Image (cartoon, rainbow, N blue to C red):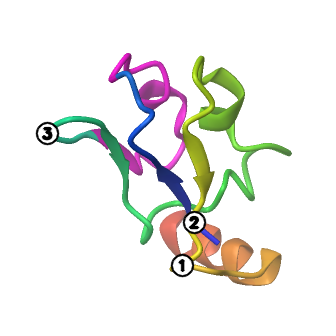
Amino acid sequence: MALLINDECVNCGVCEPECPNAAISEGDDTYIIDSAKCTECVGHYDEPQCVEVCPVDCIVKDANNEETKEQLQDKFKKLSK
């Protein structure tokens, strides 16, 4: 499942450079995560790096984009080509 930045985001921007897939970008009021690029860091790290650095814990699993670990691994492989 891809991750989602909720409205608790304070727009600090520390998450954006941590994303190895460049899935995070600045939105109008908060940063946003492109679910087509988010692999929850599968293939790169053991834990999602954006979640690790977020000072307000506003990055959560996106229930509208559920994916298994295998699907995330496949997405990583496609993005790495």
Closest to the camera, between mark 2 and mark 3, is 3
Mark 1 to mark 3 CA distance (whole Å): 22 Å
Range shown magenta: 11-25
6 sits left or right of 65 in the view: left
Q: Which amino acid does label 3 sit on?
A: Asp
**How packed is label 3: few (under 14 Cα within 10 Å), some, or many (20 or more)?**
few
Number of the label disc, if any, that sits on residue 28: 3
Q: Name the residue under label 1.
A: 65
Earlier sequence position, callout 2 versus callout 3? 2
Q: Which amino acid does label 1 sit on?
A: Asn
Mark 2 to mark 1 CA distance (whole Å): 6 Å
For the residue pair 2 and 29, the one nearer the viewer reads as 29
* Image point (66%, 56%), residue name: 40
* CB within 8 Å, label 2 to label 1: yes
Q: In the image as oriented, which residue stretches furthest toward the right?
A: 46
* Image point (66%, 36%), residue name: 51
> In this rendering, is residue 59 above or below 9?
below
Q: Which amino acid does label 2 sit on?
A: Ala
Instruction: Estimate the x, y position of residue 27 in percent, counting from the top left.
Output: 20, 42
Mark 2 to mark 3 CA distance (whole Å): 20 Å
